[in-house]
Amino acid sequence: MVDISIIVPCYNEEATIRKLLDAICAQTVPMVDIEVVIADGLSTDGTRAVINDYRREHPELEVHIVDNTQRVIPSGLNRAIEGARGSYIVRMDAHSIPDPDYIRKCVDELKKGLGDNVGGIWKIHPGNSSWIARSIALAAAHPLGAGDARYRIGGVAQEVETVPFGTFHRDIFEQIGMFDESLLTNEDYEFNTRIRQSGGKVWLDPSITSIYYARPTLRELAAQYWRYGYWKAQMLRKYPKTLRWRQAIPPVFVAVLIILGLLVVGMSLARWLLAIIVILYTIILLGIGIQMSLQHKKMSYIIGVPLALATIQIAWGAAFLWGMFRKPALNTKPL
């Protein structure tokens, strides 16, 4: 009898979905206790063919596909939950690789009552073998790129604000509702906010790990963090008290740059202040790049890590500001 349902929102993941399914097959939980429910956003590549091939090759793993016609992550999660039969729900992404004991540890700690949502940390890997992809992976795990997000930078087992790939008792969705389908991003954080506001706990155990593949190019990184910043602003419209000081720093920084940039034409003080801020910021980022270069013995990190960190912070900060002044249109963007 199925006890654990792994839910996966998916769209055009032909290149990665087999890796996830292989990782699920390698779990230390008996396959007879597991089902995988993939909410596919009507993929236009070979994703469904790969999944169907995998089902024929691995009949021991029960895999189901449900349609996610809205083609956004929270609706995919909700459709998968509706189609799931397990008492425990494990949320995964098609580009994640959970360690073999990921599901067992999450469910065990959930049973012990350590949290109402249990998850672990990301081991961030580069999206490809290029120097900039490797730099991006390092930047995404650095405190300047990740803030104090424990699932990125690690730490001790503790109660936290959010975890990315959590595990839940099924009845929590009846208690506090499903994922918010009005959000294209930040749906995990918003759901975890409701858990905490209802008196529950979000628990992170750093011994629970999964591989996360960072974006391979600066362009894709900028698009990702623009999305994160914009939708964080939309979430704050509903939960303004959830704003943390670390999240305020990038938009304040970008706002200062914009204001000083507008004043440089007629105000010499603005020119000096802008120059000082840019120079100090560059020195700090270069210092981190040099540190990473010495630590990992890669000269390319001297330039690559600062470029990635600046992309993360400026894209997130600018998008957050934009999101505070502009409400979203209807949800039509694919996953």
Image (spheres, rainbow, N blue to C red):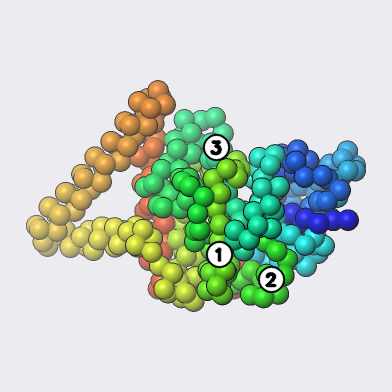
Alpha carbon distance from label 1 to label 3: 28 Å
The x and y percentages for residue 301 are 39, 31
Question: Residue 316 is drawn in which quadrant?
Answer: bottom left
Q: Quick check: 197 left or right of 87? A: left
Mark sitting earlier along the chain (1/3): 3
Labels 1, 3: front one? 1
Classify 10 Å Cα crowding around label 1: few (below 14), some (14-19), many (20 and above): many
Tell me if 290 is positioned left or right of 218 in this view: left
Categorize mark 3 by other alpha carbons within 10 Å: few (<14), some (14-19), many (20+).
Answer: many
Q: Quadrant of the N terminus?
A: bottom right
Residue that badge 1 annotates: 201
Using the image as rendered, state which of residue 111 and residue 211 is in the foreground. Answer: 111
* Residue at 43% in and 49% down: 146
Q: SS for tag 1?
A: loop
Q: Position of residue 303 (x, y in %)?
A: 35, 33
Residue that label 3 marks: 125
Tell me the residue that label 2 is attached to: 173
Sort mark 2 into few (<14), some (14-19) or many (20+) by Cα contacts within 10 Å.
some
Give the residue type at disc 2: Phe
Q: Position of residue 79 (x, y in %)?
A: 75, 66
Question: How far apart are the alpha carbons under marks 3 and 2?
Answer: 32 Å
Amino acid type, callout 1: Lys
